[in-house]
Image: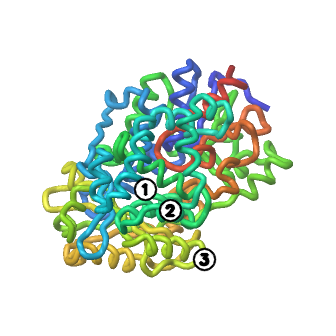
Amino acid sequence: MVRPTDLDAVVVGAGPNGLAAAIALARAGRTVRVIEARDTVGGGCRSAELTEPGVLHDVCSAIHPLARSSPFFSALPLDRHGLEWIEPPIQIAHPLDGGRAALVWRDVDATADGFGDAGDARLYRRWMEPLAREWDIVAHNLLGPLRPDRILRHPIASTRFGLPSLLPGSVVARRFRSPEARALIAGCAAHSFLELSAPLSASFGLGLLVSAHAVGWPMPRGGSQRIVDALASYLRELGGEIETGRRATTLDDLPGHRAALLDLTPRQVLAVAGDRLGGAYAAQLRRYRYGPAAYKVDFLLDGPIPWTNRDVGRAGTVHLAGRLEEVEASERAVWQGRAPTSPFVLLAQPAQFDPSRAPAGRHPIWAYCHVPNGWTGDATKAIERQVERFAPGFRDRIVALHVTRPTDYEAYNPNNVGGDINGGLQHWAQFFTRPAVRWDPYSTPDASIFICSSSTPPGGGVHGLCGMHAARSALGGVLR
C-alpha cells in the first residue's frame, strides 16, 4: 500500500542512471527525492585519492564516449554546472609488437590511412563514414529498448548499424587483412565482456568506433566525479532532493511516494521489493545472469608511460593485447573460467591531458582486465607485463598502486555482483530481454515500481539512458 506523501517519486541509487531518472521526473514537474547509501553521489562514476593525497583516480569509469553523445545528457545544461570535456588528439590506440599501432582519430580518413593496407582503408571508410554521419539517429533510436517502431523510423541507418552488429566480433575483424585493423576491431569488441566468437559482440566494437569518429572518447576535466556532480547540481536546481548516507533495505524504508525507481540490479531489486514482486516475473529476475568481472589497478607513476610508439601517448584510451588472436584468447579464457595469462587490458592516461588530476611529476594511470565473475586471484603482475611489453621501462616509473578486485567492486557497490560492472551479462540470450521479458522493460508487475539501472536497455555505460527511459515509463503510467 502506498503511503500518503507529498513526493511523486523516490529514486534509490545516485549513480548516473538514478540521477538521470530523477532529472527527467523533475523536468516533468514531479517532486522527487534520490536516496543514496553512500556519503556521496556517483555509483560507477566517482573519483578519489586512491594512492597519494592530491592525485585523483577514477574509481570505476574513466572514458565517456556515451556520456558525451547521450541524447539525454546532451539536452542538459551540464556545462553550466561545472562539466567540461577534454578530448585527446587520438581517441584510441592499440599498439602491436615492433612499435606499430592502430590509431583512431576523429577523422575517418586519417584512421583508415594508418592501416597500411589500401583494401582495409577503403573498407573502413565505406563502413564508418555513413555511420558517423548518422550517429545522432543511431543514438536516439537504437540506444534503448529494441522496438519495431524505433527501427522503422530510420530503416536505412538501422540496417546499416544493426546487421553487422548481430555478428561475432571475430567475424567482423577478419573482414580486414592488416594486423592493425584486425586488432583494433577486436579490442573494441572486447569491451562487450563477451567471447569474441559470440553473436552481438561486434555491436559493441561498432558502436564504440562510430562514436569515436562522431563525438570522440572524451574525459571530464577533474575526473569522472564531475559528471555526477553536475547532474546532482542540476537536479537540485530543478527542485529535486538528494539524501546521502541512507541505505534502503526495503521499500518500507523509503519516504511515502507514488512511484519508486530502483537503480539496482535484479538481485537487489528482489531484496528491496520483497513480496511486492513475485510469480513468473520474480522467477525471471532470479534467473538473471551476471557476466565476467573487472580487475583494476590504479598506478601512480613519476612520469608519463614510455610508449615505444610515441603516438600512443597522445591517446586517452589504450587497448593492450597485441594481435587479434591474442585478444580472442584472452576473452576465451575468461569465458572458460580462467584468468588469462596475457590479458586484454584497457588503459587510460588522463594526466597527459588534464593536469588538474595530479601535482606536477605525478601521473595516475587507470588499467583493468577481464576475469571470471567472483575471481579471487591476483592479476596485477599480468597487467603490468602487458603495459611493459609496449612501454619498456614502465615498471621503473611506478611510485604506488591501488588494486580493485572483483570482490572489492561488489563491496564498493552491491550492483557490481561478482565484479560485473555492466549490470549483468550482455549476451544475446538476455541482450534484448534485460532484465525480464516485458514490452516495457523498465516497468514491473507492480505499477508503482520501476527499474532504472544498467540491467535495463541499453545496458552498461555512463549515459543516463536507462534512467531516462524508466522515468518516461513512470510518467506514462502511475505518474501520468
SS at badge 1:
loop
Q: Which mark is residue 60?
A: 1
Q: State the image coordinates of residue 32 (x, y, percent, origin top left).
A: 57, 28
Q: State the image coordinates of residue 478 (x, y, percent, origin top left).
A: 72, 25
SS at badge 3:
loop
Q: Answer with mark 1 or mark 2, whichever residue precedes in sequence.
A: 1
The residue shown at (30%, 67%) is: 95
SS at badge 2:
helix
Name the front one of labels 3 and 1.
3
What is the crowding at mark 1: few (fewer than 14 residues within 10 Å), some, or many (at least 20)?
A: many
Q: Amino acid at mark 1?
A: Cys
Quadrant occupied by the N terminus:
top right
Q: State the image coordinates of residue 195 (x, y, percent, origin top left).
A: 56, 67
The residue shown at (63%, 58%) is: 427
Could you tell me how many numbered marks the image carries? 3
Q: Which mark is residue 409?
A: 2
What is the crowding at mark 2: few (fewer than 14 residues within 10 Å), some, or many (at least 20)?
A: many
Q: Amino acid at mark 3?
A: Gln
Residue linked to disc 3 = 336
Would residue 70 appear left or right of 54 to someone viewing this image? right
Give whichever of 381, 322 is nearer the camera: 322
